[in-house]
Amino acid sequence: MIAPRRFLPSISALLAFEAVARLGSATNAATELSLTQSAISRQLKTLEEQLGVNLLSRQGRQMVLTAAGKSYVAQVRDVLNQLAQASVAARSNPTGGALNLAILPAFGMHWLAPRLRDFARIHPEVTVNLSTRLKPFTIDQSSFDAAIHFGHADWPGVDYLPLMAETVVPVCAPSLLTAPLAEPRDVLDHPLLHLETRPRGWARWLSALGLEIDPPTGMVFDQFSTMAQAAIHGLGIALLPTFFAEPYLRDGQLILASDRPAKSNGQYYLVWPEARQPSAGLDAFRSWLLGQIEAENVS
């Protein structure tokens, strides 16, 4: 349900407010928006009267945000950006088939992206826009239609489709080892590379193999891709998802440091806001993605 009209300022008023907040004066805002200074002033007055709060105060020739104004302008910018993105999507795909998807970099680029050509072939009416996010976020307050998350399906306010569990393997450069280590605990004799979002990744891998050991600290990376590059250059052993490691193993840039894979503590999900009606594009993408997962499980 859309909020009552009294809580919905006009776009003109919001644009005027945002411009003044950013540029510091009604004169500069008027120049940018091709309006008169008095028109900008009227828009600001109307907005403040509608909200019942002062958003700006004058200090000399400058217009300065109040505390309420600072909080409000950040949200106004988000709303204006989302509206602009929706307008661009509607213009580029008049049938309403745009799908804005947030992806985890490794899963998105190494598992999803190679398969998207098949989706585009089946659903040419849907334009998929990808944007990377490293951690789960509140999707119902974003412009995304859906997202790929990794974890335990305990995110509030979303519906979800389980995709796949994650299996990880230790890998390293051929210059570090010539063959897989005989025992899993032998990885502790070498530098271990860590992922920021999986701080207990090595501990869980060891535990899955029956070793309750706290591994030593080491270099920390924010993405699998940078950690893989560090491993390629001989900086240590990296724990990578099998779907991510396979291309590097095939071309010989990396080798298995241990031939003992283990399941990660979590899995991948497609999530979308439960309070928002799924678009036709999202419905098509969910069905296609489910088919991809089922085909992979069969093979």
Image: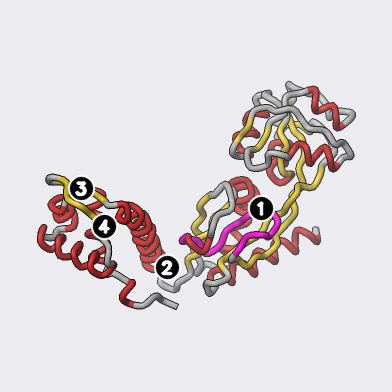
Q: Earlier in the sequence, mark 1 or mark 3?
A: 3
- Compared to 188, does 56 lie above or below? below
Q: CA distance from mark 2 to mark 4?
A: 37 Å
Q: Which mark is residue 24?
A: 3
Q: Secondary structure at mark 3?
A: loop
Residue 152 drawn in magenta:
yes
- Is residue 280 visible in the rendered structure shown here? no
What is the quadrant of residue 53 in the picture? bottom left
Q: CA distance from mark 1 to mark 4?
A: 40 Å
Q: Earlier in the sequence, mark 2 or mark 1?
A: 2
What is the quadrant of residue 176 in the picture? top right
* Amino acid type, label 1: Phe
Observer-side mark, 2 or 4, equals 4
Magenta stretch: give its range. Answer: 142-156
Q: CA distance from mark 2 to mark 1?
A: 30 Å
- Is residue 65 visible in the rendered structure shown here? yes
- Seen at 73% across and 56% down, the residue is 164
For the N terminus, the image quarter is: bottom left
What is the quadrant of residue 284 in the picture? bottom right
Q: Residues within 10 Å of mark 3 (few under 14, many from 20)?
A: some
> Which residue is under mark 2?
93
Q: Earlier in the sequence, mark 3 or mark 2?
A: 3
